[in-house]
Amino acid sequence: MSADAVTNVKTNNTWIIALLVSMAVNGLLVGLLLSKQVQPDIVRPELPPAQNTQRIVPNNPRHLVRTLSPKRRKQVMTTAMKNLDVKGEGHPRPMFKQLQQAKMKTMNLLSADALDTAAIEQSLADIRVLNQKLAVSGDALMLEVLAQLTPEERKTAREALQKRKKMRRRKANRREHQQR
């Protein structure tokens, strides 16, 4: 055999091997694509609808006074904060700062090199206590705000809250629908 014939055979073998490898790769890709189409849909268990944990009365007084004029809003909130009597629980603003600090402390404990579970548990317990105190304080503030509103203002606030609640439900339904 001449040198040209040997080179031709090697070149032909190289092309044949490349063709076979290419066909194998294409076959795998087609198989993967077909398996995804043929594979039955994963049956997701139907989850019960989320429990409505939102209170009947909102816990944020700002939602109630949102419909008032800025001057009236400031007057109502200032008077409510002055009249706030929380039975030793304290005012909401300092508690929000304490809550923020407690959360930062927890995050720092979580990212520390040495895991101190006792300190993390204590920090989480502190957050629970602060959340409970804030709930009591927020409820008292809501009552103070409501006591200052006229019946017409309460009616307008109620309608605005109902509208806001419907809008939040629509958003949640849209998000849920988009995830499917």
Image (cartoon, helix red, strand yellow):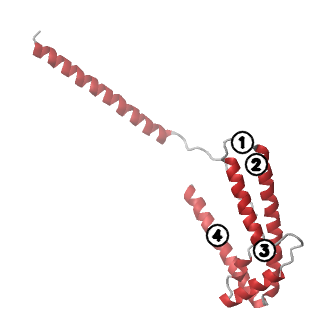
Where does label 3 land, which residue? 57
Q: Are marks 2 and 1 in contact (CB under 8 Å)?
A: yes
| Residue 110 in picture, x, y percent from top left | 69, 48
Q: Is residue 16 above or below residue 150?
A: above
The quadrant of the rendering that contains the C terminus is bottom right
| Residue 171 in picture, x, y percent from top left | 60, 67
Disc 4 residue type (three-letter): Arg
| Disc 2: CA contacts within 10 A as few (<14), some (14-19) or many (>=20) | some
Camera-side residue of 29 and 145: 145
The quadrant of the rendering that contains the N terminus is top left
Where does label 2 land, which residue? 120
Callout 3: SS = loop
| Residue 88 in picture, x, y percent from top left | 88, 71
Specify which label sits upstream in the sequence, 4 or 2.
2
Q: Is residue 159 above or below residue 175?
A: below
In three-dimensional space, the C-alpha distance between marks 2 and 1, rounded to whole angstroms, equals: 8 Å
Query: Picture quarter containing residue 61?
Result: bottom right
